[in-house]
Image (spheres, grey):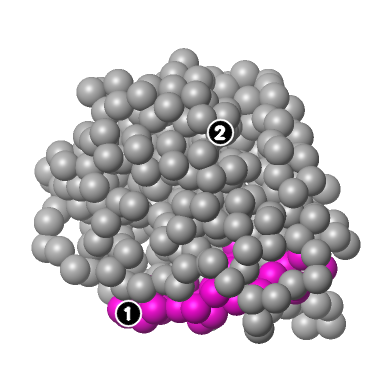
Amino acid sequence: MTTETSSTGALFQPFACKSLHLPNRIVMAPMTRLFSPDGIPTQAVADYYRRRAEGDVGLIVTEGTVIDRAPARNDPNIPLFHGAALEVWQTVVDQVHAAGGRIAPQIWHVGGAANPSKPWQPPGGLESPSGFIGADTPTGRVMSEEDIADAIAGFGRAAAAARRIGFDAVEIHAAHGYLIDQFFWDRTNRRTDRWGGASLAERSRFAIEVVKAMRAELGPDLPLILRISQWKQQNYRAKLAETPDELRQWLEPLAEAGTDIFHCSQRRYWEPEFAGSDLNFAGWAKKVTGKPTITVGSVGLSGEFLGAFRGEGAQPAGFDEVIRRLEREEFDLVAVGRALLTDWEWPIKVRDGRFDELRPFAREDLAVLS
């Protein structure tokens, strides 16, 4: 790919879903930053999000911020979404709105996923559906019925807080091998009670109850986004749904429960999801549910985003393919990660055709809130 592109107009068309009205189709992808000591975001965090609003990002999705349950995080610098942290999130929302932006928190529970770079554990340790993080890797204590009920209630309380603070939408993190995804995946959900099952539809019960709990608190008009993935950090080749019909059986109940937008995470957005069609994950999710979708995965930069965790840099790349698919209405929104992390003016530069000013991504960018 090159940084040249014929037209970026499709990226700058307005979008609306319920009460959410966006000036363009660019979404800031949620990216864990670890700049919230003891779980409390700092003013630097607020400034970081405000700058993206000033840079004309259509919708900012925050880094994962965890529910009111001790095992929900695997690092003390992951922000909380309860208690004293909510005062700072109010400041974030106010500053983003003052800059003309729109913002959604990503609500998270890591489940049994330990932090590979840090031995820290939450009080009482991690928890997971069945005590496994992969096929043969035990981790976290098995969640009881009471644990599950409290986690679902915690997601509901987070939704209530988000509405009270004034967020424009809310996203649930149900991807990448974290708690909700651990319930989806048969390698990590081996339960024989009502929270498990042989089929993906059966193993979706926990996610459906989370969506229902959050929908009840958000009311009918505030959009609820669900971030999903086939791949896991434990297994990049994993597939929950092997066919379009299996995808439909998985996602339709989640849409009926109250999901408004599916945020479909791929490592490379241009790769087809199923044989016989060039539709990507977001394209198929929209096709089988009729709901708006967000595509994401190595948009705007060379190389895939997982390379950043290996210390790899990346150069600006063109957008012809993602724009072509957007023009065909395969999906509705485009999430951008590393490119926005390193350059808060990315949307303005793309809109104005200033492609030669786009900044490359370097591993050092992860160490600062620019």
Residue sitting at x 46%, y 16%: 164
Where is residue 229? Give x, y as percent.
56, 62
- 216 to the left or right of 159: right
Crowd band around label 2 with a 10 angstrom C-alpha radius: few (<14), some (14–19), many (20+): many
Residue sitting at x 51%, y 39%: 54
Where is residue 183? Give x, y as percent.
46, 55
| Amino acid type at mark 1 | Arg
- Of marks 1 and 2, which one's residue comes earlier in the chain? 2
Quadrant of the image occupied by residue 14: top right
Q: Is residue 210 at least partly visible in the picture? A: no
| Amino acid type at mark 2 | Gly
Where is residue 137? Give x, y as percent.
28, 74
- 256 to the left or right of 63: right
Tell us which disc is closer to us: 1 or 2: 2
| Rendered view: 320 above or below 162 | below
Quadrant location of the N terminus in the rendered image:
bottom right
Q: Is residue 306 magenta?
A: yes
- 289 to the left or right of 258: right
Crowd band around label 1 with a 10 angstrom C-alpha radius: few (<14), some (14–19), many (20+): few
Quadrant of the image occupied by residue 15: top right
Closer to the camera in the image, 10 or 211: 10
Closer to the camera in the image, 352 or 85: 352
Residue sitting at x 31%, y 63%: 366
| Residue at image mark 1 | 310
- Disc 2 element: loop
Number of the label disc, if any, that sits on residue 101: 2
Which range is magenta?
296-324
